[in-house]
Amino acid sequence: MFEGRPAELELVFDKILAEVADWDDVLISTSKNCIVFVHKRTFFVIRPMQKQLDLKFYSKTKPESPIIIKSTFHAGKYENSTRISQLTDLTMELFGMIKDSYILL
């Protein structure tokens, strides 16, 4: 899935995986285009792009954070997207939002 992409993208993914896979009752599956994290329902999706990872997660309220590039309200919750490309993009704020999505769903 990371073939032909910058090596740092795989490192970023590995760091996310190491954190999120340790949470209780998380199932991880892959498709041709994405990696899906499930806890009761899908709470987090990673789509490797050419030079970035597109991350999608959910929240009860619209996040007021500059790292969110898109937030749409659907089925009683907000679907939020951000894109990251390096290890320094993995902040406590981002992991907090992913954890909130895990708790929500």
Image: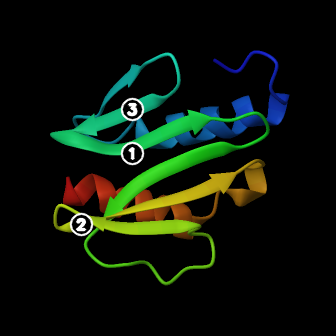
> In this orientation, which residue lies closer to the viewer: 5 or 104?
5
Q: Amino acid at mark 3?
A: Val
| Disc 2 element | strand
Which circle's residue, 1 or 3, is located before the other in the chain? 3
Q: Position of residue 23 (x, y in %)?
A: 33, 42
Q: Is residue 18 above or below residue 43?
A: above
| Disc 1 element | strand
| Disc 3 element | strand
Task: Identify the residue under disc 2.
Answer: 77
* Residue depicted at x 72% and y 43%: 52
> How far apart are the two marked residues, 1 and 3, measured between alpha carbons?
6 Å
Asked if labels 3 and 1 touch by Cβ distance under 8 angstroms, the answer is yes
Identify the image quadrant of residue 7. top right
> How far apart are the two marked residues, 2 and 3, measured between alpha carbons?
18 Å
Task: Identify the residue under disc 3.
Answer: 36
Q: Which mark is residue 44?
A: 1
Horizontal placement of 4 versus 66: left or right? right
> Mark 2 Cα within 10 Å, few/some/many (few <14, many 20+)?
some
Q: Position of residue 57 (x, y in %)?
A: 40, 54
